[in-house]
Amino acid sequence: MIWLALMSGVANAAGWSLVGAYDSSSVSTLSEAPAGYVWREAEGMKTSCGPAKRPDGLGIFEAEAANYGLMPMLTLVLKSDSPGETLTSQQVQVTLNLGDDQVSLEPMRLPRQLIVSIASDDSTERYAQLVRTQIAVETCLEHKTGRAWTGGPDGERLKEAFLLSRPGAVGRRFFGGQSDAVPALLGPPDACMVSVPESQGAEGRGEGSLTLVPTDVWGASLRRCSDVLSPGDAYDGEDSPLLPLRLTGEDQLLRRKDPRTWNSLQVALRLDPEPAATESERVFFDLSHGDHVLAQNEQLFKQRDDSTLGLSDVLARLPHRFPYVDGEGGPYTVLMIPNWQLVEALARLERDQALPADLKDVRRPMGTPPVGVTDAVGYVLGHPEMLLVQIERNPGDDRWPNVANILRGNFGPWGYTVGLREGRARIVLPHDEPPSWEQTARAQRAREHAAMIAALFLLFFGGLRGFGRLRELWARVPEERAHYWPALGSVVLSETPTAKPEDES
């Protein structure tokens, strides 16, 4: 219990604690098929960017696969001590670790609805056009693939992540060996731009096939925002539902903190009067997202590794929010990690250490998945020491506590949830109906939990009985000694039987 209290203190250091870790797909199979959730693109983005593209080999978006339980899904439920608190992608880091190697994971995220505004003057107008094109292409890629834009180190890996080029390896489950884990969106994104010509439609910007090609985003543009639309307005895209998430409890009135409002993305460009080697080095920008300033007085073009100037990725700086469910007992944030990311991470971590350094680089995918590992979610739950879920404690603090420490107990893998301290913790499923008691018991491995408790009780009872007999080790045992054996006296037994006297009669 002392160990449990210490671990609880570590887990709550950031105001968040891990109260559930389970495979939501295996739990959801205990109920009937969920309601017909379909990932439908926003009509505005469809008009501007063209039709969305489902991934090859899967045929549906990952949010749909999660809803129908078509792939194992590691679900981590975090509970906050503060009401109304939410987490963004800049406050959470999920990784798998093996020795000194580490691979990042990207949980599924909520879509954004952006009102893009770019301020410039005559001296920076041509640079503003570059930023407009960059944001339009990136937001259209989010719309096309249903995947969140997070930026990347080079263009080739970004094209691979967003299905524009064939991955470097094959043989993965559901996806083909991307070099980077790419977070899926739980619903379609939407965006419009202020003070640009009205979009002329999406003719020539893609076909209805699943395969995504570069021509699908060439000439991408965003439609012009309505004059009556302003940041903070409720999003009106009712035809594009989010993936439903429900918390345990039939008798509770649950609500999901509504993230579906229009948010502003403001970029202001200026030209520094100080002389520089090139005019591009004099361009600076300020970036704000809603009320948050993300960049101030930064160079728009920065030096790359090859000593050339590269355009800063503006959209990659914007945070994504994780799904949030509120119920009686506190707010919960849900981190959903699909099986294919874990398979890919395990493949990179389990490389032969004797390989050359360039071949065992964890950033490079392997040609085959780990030997014997098909259910990577179950493997990670069985080896919780590999999982790190770090949450920012205070802004600017480099020490991010690991809330997954609570899974590393010495009691064995008999409970995926935080057993003794949160034995009846609520679970969240991607369904329209609240999880049933049977699903909750399955997620918390109630049978294994009960078997362990019963075994501990029997062990305690047997130990108690044995403890009561310890005194027999030193207690004196009563003794009775026989000095002679009873004999038959003087009776002599004849070797021949005595004749029976005859009856006188």
Image (spheres, helix red, strand yellow):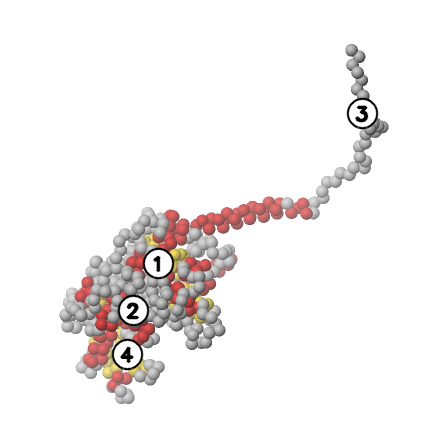
- Residue 112 in the image: x percent, y percent? 26, 65
Q: Quadrant of the C terminus?
A: top right
Q: Given contact means CB atoms under 8 Å apart, are the residues at marks 1 and 4 in contact?
A: no
Residue that badge 3 annotates:
497
Residue that badge 4 annotates:
311
State which mark lies toward you, 4 or 3: 3
The residue shown at (30%, 51%) is 33
Identified by mark 1, the residue type is Met
Which secondary structure, mark 3?
A: loop
Residue that badge 2 annotates:
163
Mark 3 Cα shell of 10 Å, populated few (<14), some (14-19), many (≥20): few
- Residue 133 in the image: x percent, y percent? 22, 75
Identified by mark 2, the residue type is Leu
The quarter holding residue 270 reads bottom left
* Gap in angstroms between the C-alphas marked 1 and 2: 19 Å
- Residue 115 in the image: x percent, y percent? 22, 68
